Amino acid sequence: MRSNMRIDQIGGVIKAFPAMPGAALKLLTLADAPCATVQQIEDALRQDPGLTANVLKLANSAYFGIPSKIGSVRQAVMLLGLKRLVQMVVTTCAGAVIDRGVPGYDLPAGELWRHSLAVSVAARGLAAELKLPAADEIFTAGLLHDVGKLILGHFVQEDYPEIERALAQGMTFEAAEAAVLGIDHAEIGARVLAQWSLPENIVHAVRWHHAPEKFGSVDIMLDVVHVANMLCLMIGIGVGREGLLHEPSPIVTRRLGLGPLHLEKVASQTLQ
Amino acid sequence: MNITVSVGDMKTGRTGDILVTHALGSCLGLMVFDPVAKVGGLLHAMLPLSSINPEKAKGNPAMFVDTGVPLLFKSVYEMGGAKERLIVKAAGCGNPMGKNEIFKIGERNYTILKKLLWKNNILLKAENVGGTASRTIHFEVDTGVVLLSCNGSKGPL
């Protein structure tokens, strides 16, 4: 009964969660369109000068490694391509919400953001190390996989004694969330992203990132995000109160052909 | 002074310093203390063997147990620490749930540590390793007291 009540409350918070800015949504649609023009992209970003400024700042950051200075949206599209520009827009929008501290999971301000970026980098590194054809969206999926924690954190905090009792029975942390609150952070994240109209493969990767074997199909991107998330928690990036109370999937390990040395190599590259 | 030791890092201190490291998951936290010289060091190593990424190890030996542990002892000796007086404590080396051996980096970190210590005739005075907890360490170099926070509780190691 209690968890039913909680589900209603949580559902309300999901609906009230900040929307993706209009310019970002427009750009996401354009990224899927086969013949989007640079002009259309410029027009979409022109609606939001603040967003444009932040995107250009990110495009010029060391992370993307572009040697010349990018001064305009047109130049950014030319040098980076539309897909990467969209990644940057999503990163910029997500950064604004993911940066804050998360109660319940005991993550100080900035830590979930650090974890999200690290999972993106590790996911890309794993795909390269395993020579897997991962989708372009892997960066965005890695970045947004834990967005549900921002909503669930408050409820985890309130019901922590019950969650602890569930954990004492040997459950994973996300199973304890679902047992006590009726929903886990992965499902909440997927609902937020569906609300933001993000591509379906990203929504699936976020929904099943702790239980990839429960996804009705096989998606390399999901498998890689699952492993990258586990790895980043293990090396202490964004690991909060739940510690390592998660279970890496043996099925995923097998189908990725993942070995201990792959994992350790990627770990050594992920830390800046 | 509080000195923070981040992942893949090693710091030393003297009387008045507190060496702090957060979020030890599968990483190894190793504390070395000389009660007479009142010097100590704390290592937060991420991976067992430097052979996985020799280039990284060259720039940052503290990232790996096999290069970080010798670096820690050497640094404490250079500050006046003597091998026969050293008190050595270990924490961390956790693993995720389940039996997936591939993810047992914590276990592998611990194995390499034990091998190194055994080869050099060094015993651990205390340890809090394994399990699924994320651990935080506060090491007071003045007294050698190591406070371990994990699962919401705090106590001496």
Image (cartoon, coloured by chain):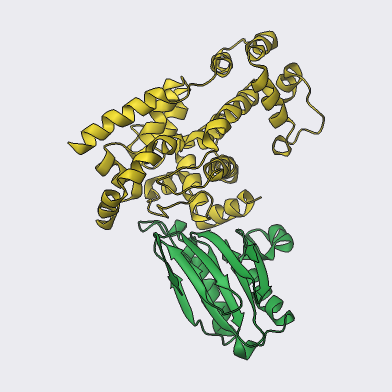
Residue at far bottom of view: B84
- The answer to whether any part of residue B47 appears in the image is no
Quadrant of the rendered image containing residue B86: bottom right
Residue A272 at x, y percent in the picture: 66, 50
Asked if residue A98 lies left or right of residue B13, the reply is left
Vertical position of residue A98 compared to residue B58: above or below: above
Chain given the colour green: B
Residue A147 at x, y percent in the picture: 46, 35
Vertical position of residue A223 compared to residue A24: above or below: below
Chain given the colour yellow: A
Q: Residue at x 42, y 47 (%)?
A: A105
Q: Residue at x 37, y 53 (%)?
A: A245
Residue B79 at x, y percent in the picture: 73, 80
Nearer-the-camera pick, A52 or A172? A52
> Quick one: quadrant of the N terminus of chain A?
top left
Asked if residue A177 lies left or right of residue A193, the reply is left
